[in-house]
Amino acid sequence: MEYVFHIIIMLNIYIMLVLSANLTIGMANLLTMCQAAFYGIGAYIGTFFLTQFNLPFVVIAFLVMVITGTFSFLVSFASVRLKDDYFVIATMGFQLIFFTILYNWTDVTGGPHGLLDVPGIKLFGVYELSGVYEYLILSLIITAIVVWLFHNLASSPFGRVLNAIRADETMALAMGRDTAMFKSWAFFLSAAIAGLAGVVYASYNSYINPNSFKLDESIFILSALFIGGIGNTKGPILGALFVVIIPELLRFVGLPNTIAANLRQIIYGLSLVLVMYYRPQGILGKTILK
């Protein structure tokens, strides 16, 4: 049963990550390649606070989200005014820089060996979570809050402006909207949620290393988003279900691990090709990324 709980916890983490990517890609029309970097920033900063301070999880989560979101401003300041391929390249550059720092700054990040014995999350600064069941409950609660937040964000004034920017940025500018500012705040909120997922992952896994937050992970998150669908809440949830559940189902087929790993990549690639051909907006997507 613990195996099932573990899968559900990882599914919750990826739902948060894919939803955060949907905010920038599906709503603000910003194709980013650095979501794993914000995921990693949250994991490493969360590890620092968990290790050095006896703080309640709510406080640590808030600090991690604010700090991770602040890092996003470093990217958005130079990037949100760029268009199309130039923006993608800029965010990819940030992703590569972040991974290089993690991999080489051994005194702080542990380098390629990572950080061991990450403490568990402490509720109210007293009770430390340790079991899989406890993390299952916590991840379900956090994910439910994040899903509710993004569901209501689409109909909020902020969400309506982002939708207008996605549909026609020139028209939004003509209506007096500061599109660069709205994109920056969308980037901030997206990074903050990814950072929250990072601290949950670090504490639950009790070990982190740079390989969990490299460019491949950003592509993995984007694949889930494009398969599920952009522009709404249901699509990212479906995409996260697909990328988390399918690899686990392959374990029961009886294939050797090496073949199963390669088959997983083939399935992802084939799924993306088929979805992009027959449903460019994703399986449950309602809007097409322009």
Image (tube, grey):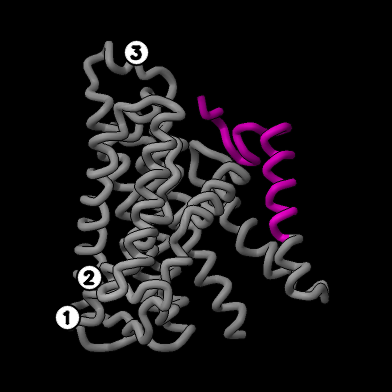
**Callout 2 crowding tier (Cα within 10 Å): few <14, some 14–19, many ≥20:** many
The amino acid sitting under disc 2 is: Ile
Distance from the alpha carbon under mark 1 to that under mark 3: 48 Å
Q: Which is in the foreground here, disc 2 or disc 1?
A: 1
Q: Residues within 10 Å of mark 3 (few under 14, many from 20)?
A: few
Residue hosting label 2: 60
Q: Nearer the viewer, residue 110 or 181?
A: 110
Q: Residue at x 62, y 85 (%)?
A: 1
> Element type at marker 3?
helix
CB contact under 8 Å: marks 2 and 1: yes
Q: Which mark is residue 171?
A: 3
Q: What percent of the width, then of the height, locates residue 128?
A: 30, 87
Q: Quadrant of residue 115?
A: bottom left
Three-letter amino acid code at the position of disc 1: Phe
Using the image, tell me which numbered label, if any, was put on residue 53: 1
- Per the image, is 221 magenta? no
* Residue at 31% in and 63% down: 42
**x, y (%) of residue 219?**
53, 49
Q: Is residue 266 magenta?
A: yes
